[in-house]
Image (spheres, rainbow, N blue to C red):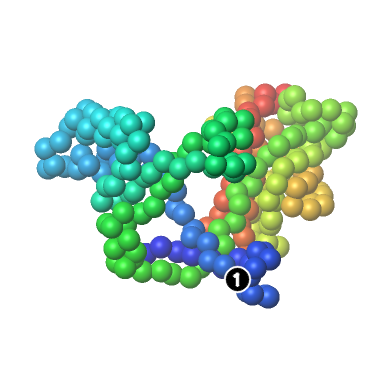
Amino acid sequence: MTIKYALNPNKLKTGLKNSYLAKVQSIGSVDLEGIVDRICFPGSGITRSEAKGVLMELNHAIESSLKEGYTVNLPFVKIKPSIRGQFLNSSDYFNPRQHQLCFTTSPGKSLKDLGKEIKLQKTHKSPKKPSIHQLINKHTNEELKELKALLVVEIKGSNFRFPKDDEQVGVYLESEEEAIKLQMISHKNASSLMVLLPEDMPAGEARFRIVVRYQHHREMMSCYSLPFQTL
């Protein structure tokens, strides 16, 4: 088991000058369905409905225990009620406008021991995925409505980064039948670019796909626009 981490500049005022802090690079998240999948492995003899039912009952038992004022102390987590906010004096009372009842959590013994079993691997910071926010027809300076041959389109978004020596990155126009790499006529910054649509347009519907690759990363990342009708 290995967890990857990257170093980021320490922006805390109390930190050492020019120091760095580690940030774990998560590979994703696991929800209730994902936990059920891990419980109901082949040969476990446990059905999905049984596993989900037990987990839901566990959740209800934890909630009812906390409502009654108990501290919940499980192998993997400890949960206890606490109150946020300051009281003016010893005669002051709880006021929902000034105070808040919340629940603090800390790792249980099994999680504390788990950290000793996991290896750490230093890596580069995971880049943010590109995203498309707006497409503009530069002939009319209005929101793009349909695709026409030789139309200039401005794409606004974030994290548009294209290494010059990488032929795979760029902007593509994709239909069900084909993907056409578009000519990029302007790339002002990481949040704006302009492309020229081809003379031979694909029939039917097509959408834009932006493919990027970041320095020190082998994997490419991409994002899509909504589909447009081609004319």
Comparing 165 with 91, the one in front is 91
Residue that badge 1 annotates: 20
Q: Residue at x 36, y 54 (%)?
A: 107
Comparing 159 with 225, the one in front is 159
Looking at numbered disc 1 in the image, what kind of residue is underneath it? Tyr
- Left or right: 200, with 61 as reference point: right
Picture mark count: 1
Q: Residues within 10 Å of mark 1 (few under 14, many from 20)?
A: some
Residue 4, percent across and down? 45, 64
Which of the image's four quarters has the C terminus? top right
Query: Where on the picture, by quarter, is residue 33?
Result: top left
Query: Where on the picture, by quarter, is residue 41?
Result: top left
Residue 216, percent across and down? 58, 67
- Which residue, as the protein is rendered here, is positioned at the far front? 91
Query: Where on the picture, by quarter, is residue 56?
Result: top left
Comparing 92 with 38, the one in front is 92
- Left or right: 66, with 129 as reference point: left
Q: Residue at x 27, y 57 (%)?
A: 110
SS at mark 1? strand
Q: Residue at x 57, y 31 (%)?
A: 95
Q: Is residue 111 visible?
A: yes
Residue 112, percent across and down? 32, 61
Q: Is residue 1 visible?
A: no
Residue 123, percent across and down? 51, 68
Comparing 103 with 52, the one in front is 103
Q: Residue at x 48, y 60 (%)?
A: 24
Which of the image's four quarters has the N terminus? bottom left
